[in-house]
Amino acid sequence: MTDLSMPQAQTRSQSATGKIALRWLLYVLLGLFALYYLMPLFVMLTTSLKSLEEIRTGSLISLPREVSFDAWKTAWSGACTGIQCEGLRPYFWNSVLIAVPAVFLSTLIGALNGYVVAQWRFKGANIIFSLMLFGCFIPFQVVLLPMARLLGMMGIAGTIPGLIFVHVIYGLGFTTLFFRNYYVTIPSELTKAARVDGAGFLRIFWSIFMPLSLPIIVVTVIWQFTQIWNDFLFGVSFSQAGTQPVTVALNNIVNSTTGVKEYNVDMAAAIIAGLPTLLVYVVAGKYFIRGLTAGSVKG
Amino acid sequence: MAPILDIQNLYKNYGATEILKDINISIEPGDFLVLVGPSGCGKSTLLNCIAGLEPITGGTLSIGGKDMTHVSPKDRDIAMVFQSYALYPTMSVAKNITFGMKVRGVDAATQEAKLKDVAALLQIEPLLNRRPSQLSGGQRQRVAMGRALVRDPKLFLFDEPLSNLDAKLRVEMRTEIKKLHQTLDASIVYVTHDQIEAMTLATKIVVLKGGIVQQIGSPAEIYNNPANLFVADFMGSPAMNLIPAQASNSGSGTQISIARETGETLVLNDARGLSLPQDVILGLRPEDIAEAGFRAGAGVQEAACMIDMVEPAGADTYVVSELGGKQVTARLHAETSAQAGQMLNLAFDMSKVSYFAKETGERLN
C-alpha cells in the first residue's frame, strides 16, 4: 500500500511546487513591469533633486549625490514663463480656481440631469440623453472657434469664469452619463413612494437620491478633476496672461529657456503640476473602483 | 354615504395603446376593494391612476367626494404600499415612517406620537433605528405599512404588497392586513394577481382583463355567479370545471347532455326552468361534485363516471374524470374509496351550475 501511494504523493507535491514556482514567476514579472512603469517617475524625482552640474556630469538613473530642493523652489516661485518669472505658483492657483468650481458645478448639474433622465421619464428623454452622450465623443478641437465666439459674446473670454463655463459644459456629457446609469438602477417605486409622501422634485433629489449617491459622486469628482486639471487645449485657447492654468504655465516654463536647459526645474515643475491628481487618486481611489462597479441598491 | 372612491368612465392610453377602457368603480367607506387579474391586465396602472402617479386620458376620479382627476398625489389624501416596499434605503425605519410628515411640516411632537402608535400597532418598536437593508422581508413589509398607516389617509392603496414574501409569511401577513382593515375600518384598494388573496381579503372584487372590467361584486357573487368564462376560470382553485354540453329545454326543466369518450352520454336535468340555447358551456365547481351519498339536495343527481386520476390533498381528495372532452375535477372527502381506472358514482349539484354562451363566453343564467 505504501509503495502504491508513494508516486501519487510525489506527483501531488510536484504539482504543488509547480504552482508555487508559477506564482513566483508571476510576482517577478509583475514586479518588473511595476519597475518599468515607475522608471520615469524615478528619473523625474532624482533629476529634480540634483543640481544642474550633477545632471550634466552624472548618469540619468543615478541617485543624487547631494539632495537639493533649489529646483523645486525655483519651479514653484522663480521660474520664467516667458517674460514673467514667478514660477508655477500663480498658475497653480488659477488651476485650483478653475477646477474646484467647475468640478462642483458639473457634478451637481450632472446629478440633476441624470436624476431627471432616469427617474422622471418625459417625452423625448431618451433623445435628449442620446444627444448629451454624443457630446462625450465630439473632439474638442471642433468646438474651439464657436466656443471662443460664444465666450466673447458673453463677455467672459480669457477669464477664469470663462474657463469654468467651458469645462462645466464639456463635462456634462460624462457626468450626466455617470449619474443616469447609476440612477436607473434605483427602483422607480422609490420616487413614487416619495411623491405620495408629498415630496417634490427637488426634495426627492436631496433627501433620497443624494444620500444614495456617494460612490458615483466620488467617481464623477475624480473623473472631472483629472480632466479639468490636466486640460491643456482649453487652457491654452481660452486664457490670457494671468488666467492661464498650470498645464499651460508648465509648457511655457519648459519651452522658454535662456541658455542652459534647467532639467531639474522642468522635472520639479512637472511633478508639482501632476501632484493634485495623484493626491485625489490616493485619497479616493478605492471609492473609484467601488463606484464604477456599484450596482443596484437593495430596497 | 358618499362613496369614498368614485371612478367614472376612466380611460388610460399610452400613445395609441389603450391600457384601461371605460372603468367605472365606486366603493363605500370601509370597503376593501381588490383589483385582480392576470399580469398585464392594467390593474397596477389603474392603481397608479387612482394615486395620481399616472395621468388619466379620460373620465373622472373622485376621492372622499372631491374631484381628484387632476390633483397631484400628495394632495389626494392617500397612502400607498408598494410591491418592492420602496423604503428609503439611507433612512432609518423611524425616518422612513416620519418622512411624509416631515415633508408636510407636521410638528415634531405629533410626529413622535404617531410614530409610537404605529410602531406599537405593527410591533416594530425594536426596529426603529435600523436601516431597511438590515430588515427581513416581513419586517420591511411592516415598515412599508407603517409608513402608510401613519398618514391616516382617506384611502389606502396596496400594490401587490405580498408577492415578494415566501408562502408562509404571505399567509401570515394576509391575515394581518385583514385584521388591520377590521381594526381601523379603513378604505382600501388592493391590487393582486392572486385570486386567493382577493377572495380572503376583499369585501368587493373587480376582475380585470385586458384593461376591461369583467365583473364587480362581492367575493361570493364572483365565486358563485361568475359573469363570464374568464372570471369563472380565473377565480377559484382548483378552477371551475367548464364542460361543453348540449341543452334542450322542456316543461320539467332543461336536459343537459354531456358527451363522453368512453361510455354513454351523460344526461343531467336542471329543474330551475331556464331557457338555454343548444350549445352551452356548463360551469360547475369541484366542490359541487361529490361522491354519491355525500351530497343531498333538490338539484343533486348521480351518475357513474370513470375515474382517471386520484389526487389526495390531505383534507380532501380530488378525482379527475373525462367529461365532454375536458378533465373534470371533483372534490371528494378524504376517506373516499375512489380508485383510478374504476367507475364511481358522482353526485352533481345541478342547482349550482353556471351556464355560459359558447361563442361569447357570457353567463346565461
Image: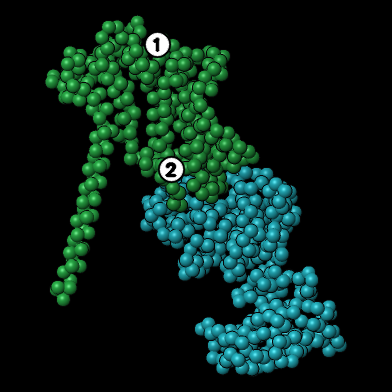
Chain colours: A green, B cyan
Tell me the distance, in whole angstroms, between the alpha carbons under discs 2 and 1: 40 Å
Figure check: B167 above or below A232:
below
Relative side of B119 to A279, left or right:
right
Determine the chain carrying the residue at label 1: A
In front of the other: B42 or A286: A286
**Along the line of sight, the residue nearer the viewer: B282 or A144:** A144
Task: Work out whether mark 2 precedes mark 1 in sequence or the reverse, and give the earlier one.
Answer: 2
- Tell me the element at label 2: helix
In the displayed structure image, the side of residue B351 where residue A283 appears, left or right: left
How packed is label 2: few (under 14 Cα within 10 Å), some, or many (20 or more)? some
Where does the image place residue A213, in percent across and percent down from the top left? 43, 40
In percent of width and height, residue A10 lies at 17, 64
Label 1: which residue?
Answer: A242
The numbered disc on residue A297 is none
The answer to whether residue B287 is visible is no
Front tag of 2 and 1: 1
Foreground of the two, A109 or B143? A109
Q: Chain of mark 2?
A: A
Q: Which residue is at 57% across, 92% downward? A: B339
The residue pinned by badge 2 equals: A212
